[in-house]
Each structure stands twice: as structure tokens, then as C-alpha cells.
Image (tube, rainbow, N blue to C red):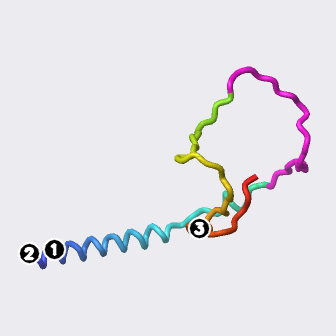
């Protein structure tokens, strides 16, 4: 029983290896790649423009795709605003005054 399974696996492995070898050794025609005539193309220079030349007037309401409601859980005034990622401790002096 075990020898049959090993025999099947070895035969399938051999067939897979032979298939990979022969598929990689196929002859390809280079005639279509090397003899293609080169075509002339037109080139334009693109420059940045800092002014909008057309005014756009529309009516309606502007609604964002995503929005967040941000509010404080406790009432009070912000005295200092610490940089993002900095470690803050209770009673620590310093920081950035909130303007």
C-alpha cells in the first residue's frame, strides 16, 4: 500500500518535471519582434500652470465622503498641545500653548 503511494508520487513528480522542461524549451519566433518598423512620434513639452483660467460656478451642497464628530468628553480649556507621538505624564510642565 505504501509502496504504491510512493510509486504514484514518483511518477507524478517525473511527469511534472518533464512537462516543465519541455514547456521551457519551446522554439519562439523572433521575426515579429526584431523587424518591426520604428514610427515617428510627436513630442510636446508639458509645463506647470499656477493659475486657473476658468471660473466654476455651481449650486448645491458640498458633502464629504467621510466625516468625524470630534468633541471633548470633559468641559474645559486646552492649555497646552503636545506633539503627536510624544509621551505625556500627569503634572508634567511645558508643552505648546494652544492659540
Mark sitting on residue 91? 3
Whether 14 is drawn above or below 52: the answer is below
Which label lies toward us, 3 or 2? 3
For the residues labelled 3 and 2, the Cα–Cα distance comes to 76 Å
Task: Name the dominant secondary structure of the magenta segment.
Answer: loop
Label 2: which secondary element: loop
- Looking at the picture, tell me which residue is in the foreground, 35 or 41: 41
- Looking at the picture, tell me which residue is in the foreground, 6 or 88: 88
Q: Residue 79: give x, y in percent of width and height.
A: 68, 56
Q: Residue 90: give x, y in percent of width and height.
A: 56, 67
Q: Is residue 41 magenta?
A: yes
Please identify the quarter of the rendering in which residue 32 is found: bottom right
Q: Residue at x 52, y 46 (%)?
A: 73
Would you name the residue on which mark 2 appears? 1
For the residues labelled 1 and 2, the Cα–Cα distance comes to 7 Å
Please identify the quarter of the rendering in which residue 21 is found: bottom left
Would you name the residue on which mark 1 appears? 5
> CB of mark 3 within 8 Å of CB of mark 2?
no
Span highlighted in magenta in the image: 38-61
Q: Residue at x 72, y 62 (%)?
A: 96
- Of the numbered discs 3 and 2, the one sitting upstream in the chain is 2
Label 3: which secondary element: loop
Q: Residue 95: give x, y in percent of width and height.
A: 69, 65
Whether 5 is drawn above or below 44: the answer is below
For the residues labelled 3 and 1, the Cα–Cα distance comes to 73 Å
Amino acid at each position: 500500500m505504501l509502496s504504491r503511494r510512493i510509486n504514484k508520487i514518483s511518477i507524478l513528480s517525473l511527469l511534472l518535471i518533464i512537462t516543465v522542461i519541455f514547456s521551457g524549451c519551446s522554439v519562439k519566433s523572433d521575426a515579429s519582434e526584431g523587424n518591426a518598423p520604428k514610427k515617428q512620434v510627436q513630442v510636446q513639452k508639458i509645463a506647470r500652470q499656477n493659475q486657473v483660467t476658468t471660473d466654476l460656478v455651481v449650486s448645491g451642497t458640498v458633502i464629504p465622503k467621510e466625516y468625524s464628530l470630534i468633541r471633548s468628553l470633559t468641559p474645559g480649556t486646552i492649555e497646552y498641545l503636545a506633539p503627536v507621538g510624544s509621551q505625556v505624564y500627569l503634572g508634567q510642565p511645558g508643552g505648546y500653548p494652544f492659540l
